[in-house]
Amino acid sequence: MSAPLRYGVIGTGMMGVEHINNLLHLEGAHVTAISDPVPESRDWAQLAVGLDTPLERFASHHDLLNSGLCDAVVIASPNHTHREVLLDVLATPHHVLVEKPLCTTVAHCHDVIDAAQATATEWPHRVVWMGLEYRYMPPTTAVLAEVRGGAVGDVRMVAIREHRFPFLPKVGNWNRFTRNTGGTLVEKCCHFFDLMNLVVGTRPVRVMASGAQDVNHLDERYDGEVPDILDNAYVIVEYDGGVRAMLDLCMFAEASRNEQEIVVTGHLGKVEALVTEGVVRVGRRADGIGRVTERPVRDDAIRHQGLHHGASYLEHVGFRDAIRGGSEPLVTLHDGLMSVAIGEAAHQSIDEGRPVAVEEVLAR
């Protein structure tokens, strides 16, 4: 058995504690230190690991990085801090997993990718992993396996629906404002744009979107300011080769059986995942109208379900294994960049009322 890996968690609000809970179930992982500027958040982390468990608690991530207590760090601080924190982490040999989105803007994503590349030769075995855990939800991985196995033939259309509850409260209510999040289509939907990119496998070319803030948070005030985050949108993404993908987002749709539905259609058939129910359906055109097989999906390797149907646990397994094996990350900073780029293009499309080329937002 390999020596235990010592983890530090930077940012211990809701998602930071979620990562801690997953690490507590991960063989070979030991949470040794955390950092957060908010004392209450540091208390949440201590409660998660156990009140009697030794845990070094820092207000500053600089102190954590300089402590010598960690082999790997997880960044789960608010979105608008990712660039600063990542630049500091990438100046050290620590392995790092950063929560989505990579950064709030494409420009900041470029900054951290440049920093990672500039220091890669100094620490060639450092693993830099982009946290896009929706890839690891068992129904989603089952859809990917069906598509890659040829069940739908040549992919022509991808449709993703997320109908869910509003944004949850966060420390300091930072997630109520686009300037802190990158906007709903970056903060929330980068997961889905990543899945589209993964399924299609070619470069996104053009984005068309329509969206608004129609229901949620309109009666809230923070220092006299009204939140400005979208709560519903349609986004169409066109890909090189002619494949089209669509996101249907509604964040005032608690009255739904499934929070997420993922559908991939090709010239031979269709496969779909119902994420909350944990069901995958496969239909082939040659079998005739209405002939569809349905099966439940699960992954017995999951030791902690958490907030994402076990996906965060499986993500951590991959991150740990890459560290131990000295292998390349399966989810890269470039994946994070491209998911943010589509979200940024979608917001620009809404703001300007026109289709936006992905190259426009990627240009430096």
Image (tube, grey):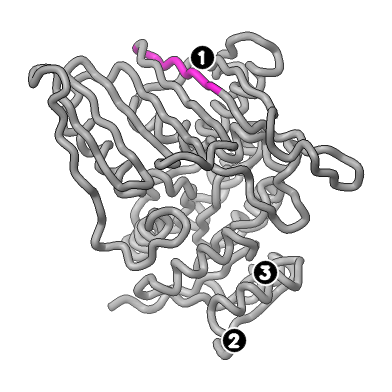
Q: Position of residue 164 (x, y in %)?
A: 52, 41
Position in image of residue 141 (x %, y %): 29, 43
Q: Are marks 3 and 2 in contact (CB under 8 Å)?
A: no
Kindly identify which residue carries mark 1. Answer: 206
Query: In the displayed structure, does residue 201 sit left or right of residue 165?
Result: left
Which is nearer the eye, 233 or 303?
A: 233
Q: Which residues are magenta?
A: 234-241
> Are discs 2 and 1 less than 8 Å apart at CB?
no
Examine the structure image and report whether residue 238 is included in the region drawn in magenta: yes
**Residue type of the residue flagged with mark 3:** Ser
Instruction: Kindly state the secondary structure of the residue where label 2 is placed.
Output: loop
**Which residue corresponds to the image point at 36% horizontal and 43% vertical from the top-left?**
275
The answer to whether 288 appears left or right of 62 in the picture is left
Residue 87 in the image, given as x and y percentages of width and height: 66, 51
| Secondary structure of residue under mark 3 | strand
Q: Earlier in the sequence, mark 3 or mark 1?
A: 3
- Residue 343 placement: quadrant: top right
Secondary element at image label 1 = strand
